[in-house]
Amino acid sequence: MNEKTARSRRKVGQAVTIQAVATQANVSAMTVSHVLNGTKRVRDETRDAVLAAVEDLGYVPNLAARQLASANAIRIGIIYRGAQNAFLSAMLVGSLNAAARLGVQVLLRKCDTFERADAIEAAKWLIGGGANALLLNPPYAQELSESGVAKEFGIPISAIAQGSPLPGVDCVGIDEAAAATEMTEYLIGKGHRSIGFVTGRPDLPAAEGRLKGYLSACRKHGIDVNPEHIVSGDFSFDSGLAAGETLLSRADRPSAIFASNDDMAAGVSLMAHRLGLDVPEDVAIAGFDDGPIAVKIWPPLTTVRQDVEALAGRGVEMLVERYRSKQGAKSSFSEAIRAPLSEQTPHQLVVRESA
């Protein structure tokens, strides 16, 4: 099915079937089911193709056909933006595997922007479609929490990759600042005294924590940071490519560059190759997250591993615990969430050829 046909189908309000998704992704309907329900591992390429087809066609699982109308069924809604994203891919794998293990269902809703109004609309769409819990990643968790609607929804909500607490939301993540400090100190230990840094979205706590850790390590080791060696990014590959061009084209280019996530680090690495620079001889490159892209580029990335699959699995567990606690509680759910959980999991420095 081509894009024009898909748009026409959505326009006239016809239901998109799982077979239509399978046809577009060039896989079987059973494979689509395995991807969406986490019931069997599939290749990364196959999963990406299925998720891209789901996104393109606007596929929504048939709740009645899947017997999701039961009052006791737990249906977890996930908001996402773009299927071609390593973080999202890992998040979906972790959440779907946990959902299959715990006997709950997962619903997906694409949101084309990170704007608060759009995030709220996407959440309401999921809830209207049967979701009675939400699993969110940055920045959607912050937007819903800070707007106050998270509490108004009256359903369990958990946020992954969120190392600091949010009102009304259970959070699980890593200590972003400590992880970034460790990576910066590793680069310093390799002899680098001029270290460039590519920031993430400034409105996200993760980006703030990673910048804080980088600056803290430089101060600790007496390194004067050149402000022009700190370049803004937005966690996308393209922003890393642009940041890499800015930093690597300078006469005083840094000898190492630490990007706030692997997608941006991969962009920096590609730009280095385009400029004829050797990695790591001419410039060492480090990333953050240890997503699939970290080992798909050459040389493979030195990076900070936060296990997004495990974080997503724990986020699903939190939702199930909250939902079942709500079902058995005599008090209202709004009273039960006065003390949301905020957990931090260990991170790991992964050293590969890029640094």
Image: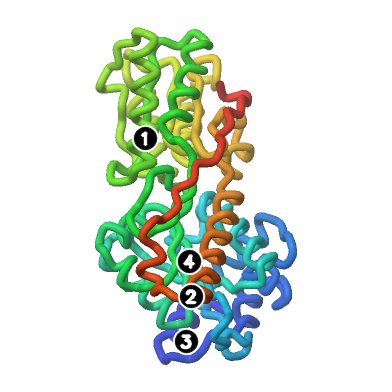
> Badge 3, how many Cα within 10 Å: few under 14, some, many 20+?
some
Residue receiving disc 2: 3
Mark found first going from the N terminus, 3 or 4: 3
Residue hosting label 4: 78
Residue at the spot of label 1: 209
Tell me the mark number nearer the camera, choosing from 1 and 2. Answer: 1
In which quadrant will I find the N terminus? bottom right
**Residue drawn 42% across the image and 78% down it:** 127
Label 1 is placed on what type of residue? Gly
Counting residues from the N terminus, which is met first, the one under dot 4 or under dot 1? Answer: 4
Give the foreground label among 2 and 4: 4
Q: Secondary structure at mark 4?
A: strand
Which kind of residue does numbered mark 2 sit on? Glu
Return the x and y of residue 241 as percentages of the image width and height: 41, 37
Residue 33 pos. (x, y %): 68, 74
Q: Secondary structure at mark 2?
A: helix
**Which of pointers 2 and 4 lies earlier in the amino acid sequence?**
2
